[in-house]
Image (cartoon, grey):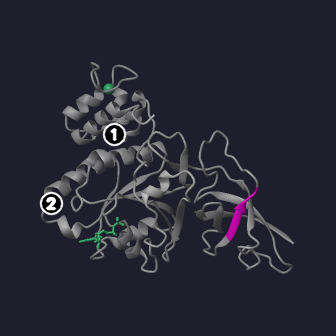
Amino acid sequence: MVIRGQATVVKHTGSHYLLSQLPEWKLFPAVLRGRIRLKGSTATNPVAVGDVVKFEAEVPEGCSAACDGGITPENPAVITEVMPRRNYIIRKSTNLSRQAHVIAANLDRAFIIATIDFPEVKLPFLDRILVTCEVYNIPATIVLNKVDLYRESHREMLEAFHEIYEGAGYPVMEVSALTGEGIDELREACRGCLSLFSGVSGVGKSSLIKALDPSLDPRVGEISDAHLQGRHTTTFYEMYALSSLGFIVDTPGLRGFGLVDLKKEEVALYFPEMLKASEGCRFTPCTHTHEPGCAVKEAVEAGEISYDRYSSYLGMLEEEGKYR
Ligand code: GDP
Ligand code: ZN
């Protein structure tokens, strides 16, 4: 008999997928039927982790649900349709490549893991990631990990960081995977959501995921950036289920994720605090650089918009076009 249903892609390896009917976490294998193509997409993968898909499967008489065991690697379900995405994030296989790989779709929130020190946070890089989240329409929260290491020694920087980013509209959480501080709050923030975890290597992303749920081990199945450079190598993204109910997509490293093609006049649209202030600019469009009567520059001078954010913005204007 044939059963049909709808499920979410929780793992993607080459041409094989694992599906689950979330929030239930019972995985079953699936393959794509023929060539499903998303309209207007140049992505190398038409289906990604987080995609909601329709499937059908031929199962023995008596199996009524997808997770009854009738669907096996030898007899996988067939993905017949990909439902429209709420959002998705991509990465380029190389800086210059036009080909993109969809990392994940339908994300509720991105948690950007950073550390004030060990390693030292690079604000222009962080701002670029936040711009990417705005472009993809994914609400972002900044998670400062390892506060046990620098809360005392970098108190002023920590305060300034809160001021800059909360001022720009981003929640900032302080946590320590080592001491467990803030982990309950982070777990609560993940509850019931599909979250992206992102951060440069060394900030403690794996430690945090383990602290959220000790049964998870993000190191298993990790891939290096180098693997993504080859066209024919298998790319591999995976969703984790927290026992506290919530789903995490772990992105290995961030290279490529922060690069979006924006026109000069578009960049400021993705700095929420500048977008707001720009309503008062005399000219539209305004690049907020040399124009008279620029409300953004006035807000920077008045200290209402952080100078660090503004200088990240200027940096992005200069780099504009570089990655095309
Ligand atoms: P990832 O590369 O982002 O996945 O980082 P890891 O989870 O591998 O952590 C990198 C290093 O930082 C490891 O040596 C961890 O033990 C350490 N680390 C992670 N979280 C914390 C923390 O909250 N406090 C301290 N002191 N060290 C941490
Ligand atoms: Zn302006």
Amino acid bearing label 2: Arg
Give the extent of the magenta segment: 29-33
Main secondary structure type of the part rendered in magenta: strand
Q: Is residue 119 above or below residue 307?
A: below
Q: Are marks 2 and 1 in contact (CB under 8 Å)?
A: no
Q: Secondary structure at mark 2?
A: helix
Residue at image location 68% in from the left, 53% down from the top: 83
Residue at image location 26% in from the left, 50% down from the top: 122
Q: Is residue 319 left or right of residue 34?
A: left
Disc 1 crowd rating (10 Å Cα; few below 14, some 14-19, many 20+) is: many
Provide residue 104's location: percent of width, then percent of height. 54, 56
Nearest to N terminus: mark 2 or mark 1: 2
Q: Secondary structure at mark 1?
A: helix
Q: Say the numbered circle drawn on residue 155.
A: 2
Q: Is residue 195 above or below residue 40?
A: below
Amino acid bearing label 1: Glu
- The reply to whether the magenta stretch includes residue 30 is yes
Residue at image location 31% in from the left, 47% down from the top: 125
Q: CA distance from mark 2 to mark 1?
A: 25 Å
The residue beneath circle 1 is: 273
Q: Say the numbered circle drawn on residue 210.
A: none
Provide residue 216's location: percent of width, then percent of height. 46, 76
Image quadrant in which you'd find residue 279: top left
Indicate the quadrant containing the N terminus: top left, top right, bottom left or bottom right.
Answer: bottom right
Provide residue 196's location: percent of width, then percent of height. 46, 59
On the rendering, which quadrant does ligand 1 occupy?
Answer: bottom left
Name the residue furthest left: 153
Q: Is residue 276 left or right of residue 247?
A: left
Select label 2 or label 1 by which is in front.
Answer: 2
- The reply to whether the magenta stretch includes residue 39 is no
